Amino acid sequence: MSNRRNVTPNDLSAFWMPFTANRQFKKAPRMFVAAKDMYYQTSDGRQVLDGTAGLWCVNAGHCRPKITEAIQEQAAELDYAPAFQMGHPKAFELANRLVDIAPEGLNHVLFTNSGSESVETALKVALAYHRVTGDGSRFRLIGRERGYHGVNFGGISVGGIVSNRKMFGTLLTGVDHLPHTHDLARNAFTRGEPAHGAELADELERIVTLHDPSTIAAVIVEPVAGSTGVLIPPKGYLQKLREITRKYGILLIFDEVITGFGRLGTPFAADYFGITPDIMVTAKGLTNGVIPMGAVLVKSEIHDAFMQGPEHMIEFMHGYTYSGNPIASAAGLATLETYKEEGLLTRGAEIGKYWEEALHSLKGERHVIDVRNIGLVGAVELDPVARQPTKRAFAAFVKAFEAGILIRTTGDIIAMSPPLIVERSHIDTLVETLRGILKTLE
Ligand SMILES: Cc1ncc(COP(=O)(O)O)c(C=O)c1O
């Protein structure tokens, strides 16, 4: 008898859930069955206010009709076209619309299916670029402690989260890391960019000198680190990284998987900080989280360097079966139109002040050792329970879900990043519900 017959309907055991405490979840499942705008609906019929835009991706809010219709129409018209040696119009159109809103100079787009794949793609473009320009000794990649660049081998190698790395052997060789910039002793309760820590970028000079500039291909950082708890760069820090990378001919890669598409109140973090990287990694908000898709934007000089040799030859040996998939492209186009029509890529700048005031009113609540914010992102850091890291914040997460708000936790940090359509009343609900929960935490 086939195993299939023994499967109990609704049995939760087969699905090994990603980045989830599986045993805890399956004892007390938290299920969403529907969503609209700012709210999820749970399987027991409750409304849950989305304080995290899903997983930092549903920037325009849930089930937006334009995006839903675009997907439906595309699925009925052209479901799939081979991604290699064939094309379809919407992928080209989406690449053009992305270039239109991207920082000046980022004129070419490679499509992927996730943030992790965008990171791998960016690292490979960087290495290959140096090789095609006759600089193939540049093989080293520099990431940063507490950086998150997805879960594939390149990403965890340049990433700096120990628990994501330690199980997986030697990873990529030739990788070094900058120190992280999180400094509660000097910067706790800062609104926006912290004052202290720009000098941490000078560590790049030390690393570059140690290995010799001629061996370094690229530096990759998140402009604002999201997944490790909203680590906002100190004033002047990213500018310094740009100066040092430029001085030594090293490519600067911004991982904008979280910061892209309006999260900071500008289209990209590159706009917020006034720095153009050589390569920009995106995903998540590109399709409003609805269909898996990522995009890597590169400067013309990088793209152009590959366009040589016989014209019938493939210039870059890389790509995915679903790169620029028609349905994802249609979702991306409808998403960008929605952002444009509703001014969502800059809405964070309008409502960001209210968000900041509301969040910082949590200073002084029990266990709160920091509150920080930028654009429409914020974090509340809690004092960990002695010898039981993550326990306090996880308790807050579960209580928040029960109380009707979705927050996210990493370690003992509560992170919030609501859809960009958030109104003041939603912010009040998020913050006041969280305040109530903080009061009850052990
Ligand atoms: C900065 C950054 N890079 C990469 C990723 C990986 O994206 P994905 O989960 O789509 O692979 C994430 C996901 O949170 C991210 O925050």
Image: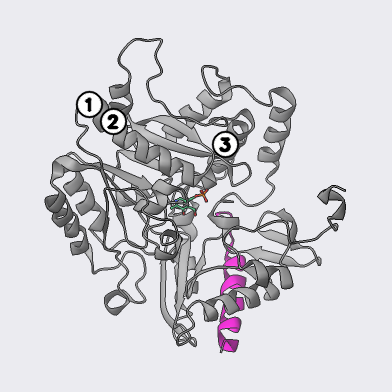
Circle 1 SS class: loop
Above/below status of 366 relative to 90: below
Tell me the residue at 45%/41% (across/down).
Answer: 118
Please name which of the two marks, 2 or 3, marks the residue nearer to the observer. Answer: 2
Q: Are marks 1 and 2 in contact (CB under 8 Å)?
A: yes
Q: Which mark is residue 332?
A: 3
Circle 2 SS class: helix
Tell me the residue at 30%/38% (across/down).
Answer: 278
Please name which of the two marks, 3 or 1, marks the residue nearer to the observer. Answer: 1
Residue 300, located in which quarter of the rendered image?
top left
The magenta segment: 420-441
Instruction: Please name the residue that numbered disc 2 is placed on.
Output: 129
Q: CA distance from mark 2 to mark 3?
A: 27 Å
Tell me the residue at 38%/25% (across/down).
Answer: 316
Q: What amino acid does circle 1 point to?
A: Thr
Residue 283 visible to an observer of this rendering: yes
Instruction: Please name the residue that numbered disc 1 is placed on.
Output: 133
Residue 7, located in which quarter of the rendered image?
bottom right
What secondary structure predominates along the stretch shown in magenta? helix
Circle 3 SS class: helix
Q: Are marks 3 and 1 in contact (CB under 8 Å)?
A: no
Which x, y percent locates residue 288? 58, 45
Within 10 Å of the Cα at label 2, are there few (<14), some (14-19), or many (20+) other Cα atoms?
Answer: many
